[in-house]
Image: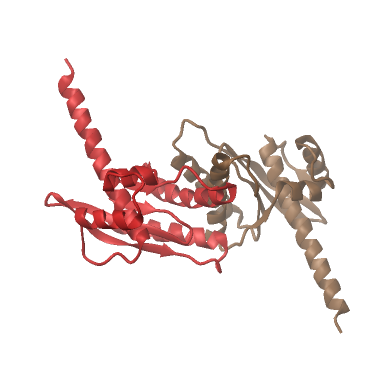
Chain colours: A red, B brown
Amino acid sequence: MLGIDPSLSATGYAVLEEAGGGLHALVHGAVRTTTATPRASRLLAIHDELLNLVRTWNPTAIAVESPFVAENVRSAMVIGEVRAVVLITAASANIEPCEYSPAEIKQVVTGYGRSDKQQVQDMVRRQVTLDSEPTSFDAVDAIAVAICHLVSSSRKAALGRLAGSQAP
Amino acid sequence: MLGIDPSLSATGYAVLEEAGGGLHALVHGAVRTTTATPRASRLLAIHDELLNLVRTWNPTAIAVESPFVAENVRSAMVIGEVRAVVLITAASANIEPCEYSPAEIKQVVTGYGRSDKQQVQDMVRRQVTLDSEPTSFDAVDAIAVAICHLVSSSRKAALGRLAGSQAP
């Protein structure tokens, strides 16, 4: 599965697979764009790189870290812009993306909704085997949202089985 | 040229050409999406239809109505999302989109920055020949942003020539 932490300057991504009862990160990194580039080109660059990842790794699920709050209208617009790029990429791969708030992700990954970046990184390292060091917290956050999705889905599946077994 | 008035529920579009000293709308309409459809699919539908327009009409310029203010963070995010779709479409056609605020467009098209939709429609009809009735104000607004761009660019060109003739 593909985890994405969208941001205009550095969109983190990570492809995770479940193998041997554990989680393994096949690839992780960040798409970086600079303020010297026009906004439209920055968004297209993020779109193209994510689309490339989707085509290369063919994920069956896409999880996205989506802040549903923002400091102000200006930052909310930018959040919306990058979010749209991710949603379009997922939709064009026929995958309905699952969105999780930063607090939800921290809660699931570290057990505490207000943990800091270092705590998230420490827990990510314990839960996922990595071939290489994460180059940034953006990549770590992308791994974290992927973990969050896997945990949440398996919880939902377990609850579903429980509900099923209780049915008459 | 292509004019776009982005909105999640109805994105207006219009393709204008200058012919015989006047302006002619080759096509105009709106891409509609409903709340019953997941957000990612709505954004992708807008993206796909705009990309289709760009490929069909091959515009040399794209003008976009962009509100830079919003009532609240929630609406700002949605504005950002649809804006990103338009910007990506333009960038993927190698066109740097030109953005104009609603007040700028009204000012140029009607001479008054706070004119209402009916006044904009009346002035659009006087300035552009249409083969068919606009189906909605969204299409009218898309024609209006295209007019705004053409007027603004010719003003800039005229000022450029003036500055050039005054050079020593």
Is residue A110 or residue B87 the one in the foreground? A110
Q: A41 left or right of A135?
A: right
> Residue at 65% of width from left, 46% of height from top?
B69
A115 up-or-down from B93: above or below: above
Q: B158 left or right of B138?
A: right
Q: Position of residue B107 (x, y in %)?
A: 80, 48
Q: Position of residue B4 (x, y in %)?
A: 64, 48
Q: Position of residue A88 (x, y in %)?
A: 44, 48
Q: A22 left or right of A117?
A: left
In the image, farthest residue toward the bottom: B168
A155 up-or-down from A26: above or below: above
Which part of the image, by quadrant, shows the C terminus of chain A? top left
Q: How many marks?
A: 0
Q: Is residue B125 visible?
A: yes
> Residue at 51% of width from left, 67% of height from top?
A34
Q: Position of residue A155 (x, y in %)?
A: 23, 36
Q: Is residue A60 visible?
A: no
> Residue at 60% of width from left, 57% of height from top?
B58
B107 up-or-down from A152: above or below: below
Is residue B140 or residue A131 the one in the foreground? A131
Asked which quadrant contains residue A150, the reply is top left
In the image, farthest residue toward the left: A20
